[in-house]
Image (cartoon, helix red, strand yellow):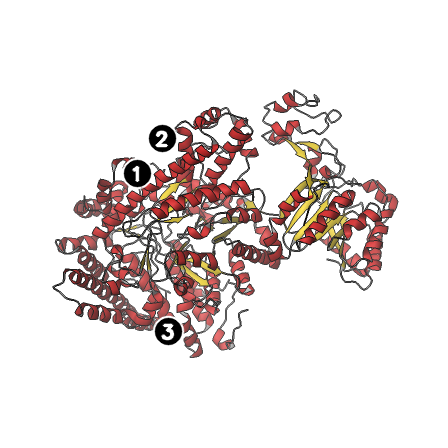
Amino acid sequence: MINSDEKRGLIFNIQKFSIHDGSGMRTLLFMKGCPLSCLWCSNPESQSCKIEVMDVKKNCIKCQKCYDICPKGAIAKEDFRIDRSLCDGCGACTQKCYAGAKKSVGQWYSIPEIMEKIEKDQLIYRNSEGGVTVGGGEPILQADFVSELLKACHSVNIHTAVETCGCGSWDNAKKVFDHADAIFFDLKHMDSSQHKTLTGAENRSILQNAESLAKMDKTIVFRLPLIPSFNDSKKNLEETGAFVASLSGSQSSVKIEILPYHNLGQDKYRWLSKGYSLESLRHPEAEHVEACRTILRNQGCNVI
Amino acid sequence: MLRISRTNEQMGTFSFDGENAFPRIENLLKAYWQSKPEVDIERARIYTQSYKETEGEEVIIRRAKAFKKYCDERKINVPENQLIMGDTAVKPRAGAVDPVFHTGWLSQELHTISERKQDPYYISPEDVRELEEEIFPYWSGKSVGDHWIKQIPPWVRELAVKTGIIDVEIKTQSAAGETAPYCEMLIQKGFGALKEEAKTHMEALDLYDPEDYSKITFYQASLLTLEGISSYITRHGKMAEELAKTAEGVRKQELLEIAKNCYHLAEGKPQTFWQGLQFVYFILAGCMMEGNGPSYSPGRVDQYLYPLYDADIAEGKLTMAGALELIESFYVKAAETTWFLSENACMYFAGYQPFHSIIVGGIDRRGKDVTNELSWLFITAKMDVKLHGPSLCVRAHKQSPEDFLIHVAKLARLGTGFPAIYNDESAIKMMLLSGATMEEAREYQMVGCVEPFISGKMAKWSDGGHYNYGAAIEFVLTNGRSTINGGKILGLQTGNPADMTFDELKEAVKQQLQYMIKAISICANVNEKVCAELTPYPFVSTLLDGTYRTGKDLTVGGVKYTIGPALIGTGIADLVNSLSAIKKHVYEDKTITMDELVLALEHNFEGKEDLRLMLQNTTPMYGNDIEEVDAMAGEMTDFAYGVISSLASWRGPHFISGLYPVSSHVPHGLVVGALPYGRLAGKALADGCSPNGGTDKEGPTAVLNSVAKINHEVHTSGTLLNMRLDPSTVEGDIGLKRITQIIRTFVDLNIYHIQFNVVNSEVLRSAQEKPDEYKSLIVRVAGYSAYFTELCREMQDDIIQRTVHTV
C-alpha cells in the first residue's frame, strides 16, 4: 500500500518491454543525475541532475515558436540554437515545439505516479519472470526515492533490479540494494587514477561498496564496459577478474558480463551541445571481446 | 509436453522444425510458382447450358442440376506428383466464373482484368468473346447484383455503391461462402450414407402437404448434388487408373492408390488418413464448385482426422513422415484455390486469398487440452510449405502445453504471418453468446479471417458489409460532406461541430455510425433475400447439421444455428485518436478552435504543417495504454455492437458485430479526408483493433493493454490484432520464449486474436524494388497472409509503415 506521495524522483525515460536488463520482460526506469561522466557514456542526458533541453536539429521545421516563447532569450533567431549559458531548462520551448526538435529531458514523478505506470505490465512480468529495473543515471544519487520505489514494487510482488556505477556512500547504496533482487554493478577500471581520468571520479568508494554488496545475499552481475584502448589492457582485465573472483567466493550468483563499447549515443551529445571525445573509436571486434572474456574466466570468474 | 510413443519405423525421417524438403513437395511447389492466375470460363459455360435447359423449374433444382452437370462434364486433372485430387478451377490459381454473381462487374471489367493493379487475372481473347457473345447476354438482368441494385432504396444506393464509405457489394458480386462443413459428422458417414438419409427423409414426407412438398424439393436437390460429387470423384479415379497403365515404379502404385481412394470415397467414408485428407479436399472443391465464395473452412483437422492417422500408424500403413508429406500435398492443393473478385472488391480482400481456414490445438468438449501429434505436424507442414493458403490457426488457452506454444513460436518467427492465434476462452464465450451449448462452443473453429464458428452447425455471413469509423468522425466535422467524394453529402447532417460540447460531438459520431450501420443492414437484408431467391446452396447445405432435420436450404434458415450477417468496423483507432485530439486541443487546452481545425482538415493541412505536427505529436493516442483514450475505443465499439445486434436480419435473428478489416482499411482510408490527429487524407486506416502505425510508442505490452479495453467477446464475428515484431527481438531460444510469453499474456488479457508479422522493413522495401526475387515472400495483411509482391503499392506501403516493436 502506498500512502505517501511526498518523495519525488527525477526520471528521464521509462522504457517498457525491455529485454536486456534483467530477466524476462521489464520496465526500465532511467534516473536522471550521475556522479560520473564517463567518456563513452551512451546516455549523456542522464548526467546532469537538472531538467535539460535537447535540441534535435534535424526535426526543426523553422516555425520560430521556440524563439518567440523563450523567457530567457536563450534561442538564436538565425538557427534556433540554444545558448546553454542562458537556458535554465524551463522547457517552455519544448511545449511549443511540435516537430520534436526541442525536447525536455527529465520529469519529476511521485511514487504513486510511477507505480501506476509500472503496474500496467504486471501480467507480462508474471508471464516472463520479468519486473522493474532502475538504472540511469545513477539510482544511488536518488537513494531515498529509489528505495521507496523498490519497496513499493516488492509490496505488489514485482521483481526488482538496479543498474549502478556503485559510486556513493555505503549508507545510500545500501538503501537501494536492500530492496533490489538483482544488482548490475559497473567496474570501469581497477586503477583509481585511470578511473578518474575516464569517469571523473576515483574508484575507492566503488570498490568498497562492491565488497560490501558481495556480503549481501543478492543476484549480482558485475559489468565491464569494454572500451578499446582505455580499459581493455590485459592488466586491467586480470585485476578486474581477480577482484570479482575474490568477491564471488562460493557464490555462483556473482557473475561478470562484458558490455562492448558502442557509439549509439553520439548524436545526443550534439543535441545537448556537448563534445564527444571518442568520435574515432570503433567498437571492439568479436574475437577481442571473447579473448577478454577468457582472461576473466582464467581469473576464476563466472562470465556471462 | 508431447510424448511420442512411436517406434523409429513408425516415425520415419522428418524434422518437426521444418526444412524437410520432400522431393515431391519441392516439385509441386516449383509447378505452383509457374502457375499464373487466369480466368476460367468452363464453369460459366456449363452452368449457362444447364440453366437454359432447366428454365421454369424450381430454382433449387436448377442449381442442383447445374452443379451436377458441372461435376459430370468439367475437365479433370490428375497432376504429376500430387497425392490429393480435385480442383476448384481448370488450372491452379484460376478464378472460375460464376455468371449469376459475376456477370455484372465482369462484363464491365473483362478488358482490364488482366492489367488491374490488385489481383489481375489473365484472360484469352477467345474467352472474352465467348463470355461477351454467348454467356453474358443470357444472364443480363438475371444476376444477383441486378436484382439487388434495383431493390435497395436510392439513398442507400448513393452511400453504398463505389463511394468506399461503406462496402456492401461483396455478396452481390460473389457467392457467400463462410462455411464450416460438418467434417466430424461427414467423415463418419461418407456421401453414400447421406444419399440414403435423403431418400429416407423424402419417403417420410407427404407429397400432398405444401410444406412437405418444398422439403421434398430440397432433398431432391441435395440428392442431385450428392450424385454430382460422387460422379466427380469417380471420374478422378478413372483418370488415375488410366494414367497408371502407362506410369512406372512408385508413381504407378500411387496412381492406383489414388484411384482406389477415389472409387471408395465416391460413396464410402474415409478409412485411412490419406482418404481423410482427400475427402476433406473433395468437400472443399465441391463447395467452391457450387458457388465459388470465400472461407470454406475444414476446421479442426487435427481432431477429426486423428483416429484415422493413429490407426494407420499403428497398423504400419503410414509413417509420421508420410503423414507430413500428405498434409503438405494438401496444403499445396489448398493454395491453388482462389476467390474471384471485382476490381473494387479486390482492394477489400487483396491477395488471391480464398480464406480456407484450418485450426489446431485447444480444448475439447469437456474442457481438456487435446493438442496431439497431428496438431504439431500441421504446424510443421506450414514451415515447409510457405504458401498463403490454407490459413493455419492455433487455439491457445491457459493450459496450452509450453512445448506446443514454442512450436507455434517457431512457425510465427518465420515471418509468414502464420499461425493466427485465438484465445479459447474468448472464442468460446462468443459461441455461447451465439446460442451454442457449452460442448458445441468448446468445439469452435475458425472460418475465413478471424470468424469463430460452431463447427458444422452454423450459417452466417461473417461479412455482410464494412462500415468506416474514420468516415464517422469526418462526417461529424463536415456536417455530412465527404471531402474526397467531391463534397457530396454522404453522411448524416449532424450540425455545426463548433456548436457542440465534447459529449455532443461524441453523440454525433454515434449517430453517424448508426446511420452507416443501418444503411448496410438494408443492403444486407435485401442481399440475403435475393440470394435465397436466386442462389440456394443444396450441396453446401447437405454438409451442415440441421438441414436434413428441417428439410430446408441454408439460405432459408435450415441450419441448426443461423445468425448474422456480421457488420464489420474498420479504423476504430482513427476515430479514437481523432476524438482524443479534439478533446485535448479544442476543448481542454484550447490550442485551436473547432473552426480552425475543420478548415485545416478540409485543406488537408496544406500550409499548416506545424498544426499537423502538433496534433500528431501531442495527442494522447490509442495503443499506449492510456486509460481515458482507450476507454473511448471501448465506448464506441460497444455502441456499434449495441446498434448492430439490435437490428433484425432477414434470415434472423439479428446482425452481429466484427472488428477485423480483411484489407478494407486501405480502400476505406482512400476515401476519408484528413483527420484531427494529424492523418493526411487518403492514408490507410488502422486495421482491426490495432493502433495506427507509428502512434503506438510504448511497445507491445502497452498495445496489448490498450486492445484489451475493447469488449472483445461481444463482437462475435471476431476482432483482430496485428503485431509487428522486429526479427532481432525473436532470435534464439529466448526469442521463442518471448513469443510464448506474449501469447500467454494475450490469453490472460482476454484478447481474442493475435498474429505476428516478423519481417524487417528493408526486406519489404527491397521486395518492392525487385518483385521477381521475392515472389514467395509472404506477409500478414489482416486476418490472412498474402504474397507481398502480389499486393498493390498502397497495401505494401501500409504493411511497411506499421509500427515495428523492437528493443
Which tag, 2 or 3, sits closer to the chain's start? Answer: 3
On whether disc 2 and disc 3 are found on a single subunit, the reply is: yes
Q: Nearer the viewer, residue A118 or B404?
A: A118
Residue type beneath disc 3: Thr
- Work out whether residue B662 or residue B148 is closer to the camera in this orientation and state it: B148
Q: Earlier in the sequence, mark 2 or mark 1?
A: 1
**Relative to A63, residue B4 above or below:** below
Residue under pointer 2: B493
Q: Which mark is residue B537?
A: none
Quarter containing the N terminus of chain B? bottom right
Q: Which mark is residue B272?
A: 3
Q: Chain of mark 3?
A: B
- Number of the front mark, 1 or 3: 1
Looking at the picture, which amino acid does disc 2 mark?
Answer: Gln
Q: Quadrant of residue B306?
A: bottom left
Quarter assignment of residue A195? top right
Q: Position of residue B24 (x, y in %)?
A: 42, 65
Task: Say above or below: B448 vs B477.
Answer: below
* Extreme residue in the bottom direction: B315
Whole-angstrom CA distance, mark 1 to mark 3, is 49 Å
Residue B356 lies left or right of residue A162; in this view the side is left
The answer to whether the residue labelled 1 contacts the one labelled 3, judged by CB atoms less than 8 Å apart, is no
> In this rendering, is residue B390 above or below B307?
above
Residue picked out by circle 1: B161
Dots 1 and 3 on the same chain: yes
